[in-house]
């Protein structure tokens, strides 16, 4: 691009981003956002919000096709045992590049569903044969990130509902494309954020709904998980796909674990919405040092050790979101919620309830008081499914089972899903938006309204509904 064209394009992009053109245009004619990225930002379309409360005819037995049977798919298939045995779901087909992974998972499936499923493998387009079948209602996608948007779009275009591991899209262009196709085809498209269904998070949400927290004005979420060993392992992530993102990108690549529950707490898309963000990454050190020590084939990485993204909502609330898979530290999702009447902080879970407007010597509730709140406000879903949850603890302590259970039972009953298309796209979009902000010296970056303005309509979070 010549300088004139670049400055014209960057100025228009700046209007979309909500930042001054000078933040994007550099004096030496080298942009921190290349022309493809600018074109991508300018290709936004208009959402109409028609998929809020999307309902379909009830599906008494949901016929499922699973794509990707690696580490994640191998866990998710186990979450169907209760649903299969109670005639709520059937797994019709499995797809993966590797035949041995399919055979292993089909052997397990055959123990709970006689005959197992049809298998598709051998080339990178074999999964399309699953989406092309006319006897499948739901595609469940658990493949590497780069395939997610394409598979979601193809599935909806072929009449399937879709549930996909995070992130559903890695570019703003694909975020808008997901909205366009989903609104046109009227198909469910769900981001499978299991942490929204965890016992602690649902307990906090239930307390917020019951007024224990008063007004929630700030929250913190994170994905802090030392993945250095896994990312450099030759077999854990097929072809070491995950670490390759860290070589070339800098931002928050895994937003949902922290952002999903926090968005539920703040009724994002249900009376409030993200307005703008700023994102900053620390320098990179821990991953490269580990790579050198272990003679790994790559030793230079673009992604900083810690990314911190601050989000301001339309109603003036604030969110701190962190991402760190490089450093050796205990696992945490933070799960901190600050309200006018109470505060919760996770890892370990602690609760403060300020009964008086002014109280000196603040301290967390003692164990007995904490347990009383936990028992009183435990989410009804976890109370009712305790036996099944305990039996499926391999799925991250039971939250994977609750997520799959809710997904299938909503489809069984023709109800809107707990996580809708607009939630899914919004949580995914924070990844490219964080990269844009980081690349532009942590510039304030406008978050597009992916809901078509429907976020202004207040409603109770769907996960609070009772479902049989």
Image (tube, rainbow, N blue to C red):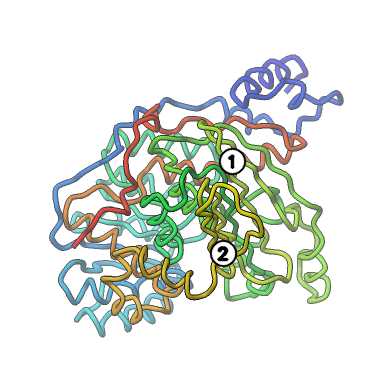
Q: Residue 24 location in percent, x, y?
A: 74, 27
Vertical comparison of 243 with 273: above or below:
below
Vertical comparison of 3 with 297: above or below:
above
In the image, which disc is placed on residue 348? Answer: none
Q: Residue 194 location in percent, x, y?
A: 43, 62
Identify the image quadrant of residue 388: bottom left
- Quadrant showing the N terminus: top right
Residue at 25 percent across and 46 percent down: it is 159
Q: Residue 383 location in percent, x, y?
A: 30, 71
- Quadrant showing the C terminus: bottom left
Q: Residues within 10 Å of mark 2 (few under 14, many from 20)?
A: some
| Label 1: element kind | strand
Residue at 55 percent across and 55 percent down: it is 343
1 or 2: tag closer to the N-terminus: 1
In the image, which disc is placed on residue 318? Answer: 1
Q: Is residue 300 left or right of residue 262?
A: right
Identify the image quadrant of residue 390: bottom left
Vertical comparison of 42 with 54: above or below:
above
Residue occupied by mark 2 = 346
């Amino acid at each position: 691009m010549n300088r004139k064209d670049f400055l014209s394009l960057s100025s228009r992009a700046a209007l979309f981003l909500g930042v001054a053109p000078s933040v994007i245009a550099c004096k030496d004619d080298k942009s921190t956002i290349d022309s493809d990225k600018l074109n991508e930002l300018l290709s936004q379309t208009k959402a109409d919000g028609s998929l809020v409360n999307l309902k379909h005819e009830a599906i008494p037995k949901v016929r499922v096709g699973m794509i990707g049977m690696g580490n994640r798919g191998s866990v998710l298939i186990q979450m169907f045992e209760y649903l299969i045995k109670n005639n709520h779901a059937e797994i019709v087909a499995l797809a993966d590049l590797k035949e041995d992974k399919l055979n292993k998972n089909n052997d397990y499936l055959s123990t709970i569903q006689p005959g197992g499923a049809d298998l598709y493998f051998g080339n990178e387009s074999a999964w399309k044969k699953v989406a092309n079948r006319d006897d499948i209602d739901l595609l469940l996608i658990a493949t590497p990130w780069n395939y997610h948007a394409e598979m979601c779009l193809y599935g909806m275009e072929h009449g399937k509902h879709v549930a996909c591991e995070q992130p559903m899209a890695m570019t703003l262009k694909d975020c808008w494309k997901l909205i366009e196709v989903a609104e046109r085809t009227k198909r469910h498209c769900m981001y499978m954020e299991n942490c929204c269904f965890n016992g602690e998070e649902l307990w906090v949400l239930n307390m917020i709904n019951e007024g224990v927290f008063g007004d929630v004005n700030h929250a913190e979420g994170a994905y802090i998980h030392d993945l250095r060993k896994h990312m450099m392992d030759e077999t854990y992530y097929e072809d070491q796909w995950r670490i390759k993102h860290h070589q070339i990108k800098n931002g928050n690549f895994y937003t949902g674990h922290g952002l999903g529950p926090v968005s539920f707490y703040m009724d994002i898309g249900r009376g409030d919405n993200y307005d703008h963000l700023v994102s900053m990454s620390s320098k990179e050190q821990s991953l490269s040092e580990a790579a050198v020590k272990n003679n790994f084939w790559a030793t230079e990485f673009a992604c900083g050790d810690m990314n911190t993204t601050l989000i301001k909502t339309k109603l003036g609330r604030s969110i701190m979101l962190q991402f760190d898979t490089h450093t050796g530290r205990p696992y945490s999702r933070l799960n901190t919620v600050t309200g006018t009447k109470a505060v919760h902080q996770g890892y370990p879970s602690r609760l403060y309830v300020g009964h008086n407007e002014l109280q000196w010597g603040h301290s967390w509730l003692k164990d007995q008081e904490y347990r009383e709140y936990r028992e009183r406000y435990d989410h009804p879903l976890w109370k009712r499914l305790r036996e099944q949850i305990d039996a499926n603890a391999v799925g991250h302590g039971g939250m994977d089972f609750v997520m799959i259970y809710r997904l299938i039972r909503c489809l069984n009953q023709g109800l809107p899903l707990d996580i809708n298309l607009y939630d899914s796209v919004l949580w995914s979009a924070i990844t490219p938006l964080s990269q844009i902000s980081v690349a532009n010296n942590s510039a304030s970056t406008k978050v597009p309204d992916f809901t078509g303005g429907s976020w202004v309509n207040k409603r109770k979070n769907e996960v609070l509904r009772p479902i049989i």
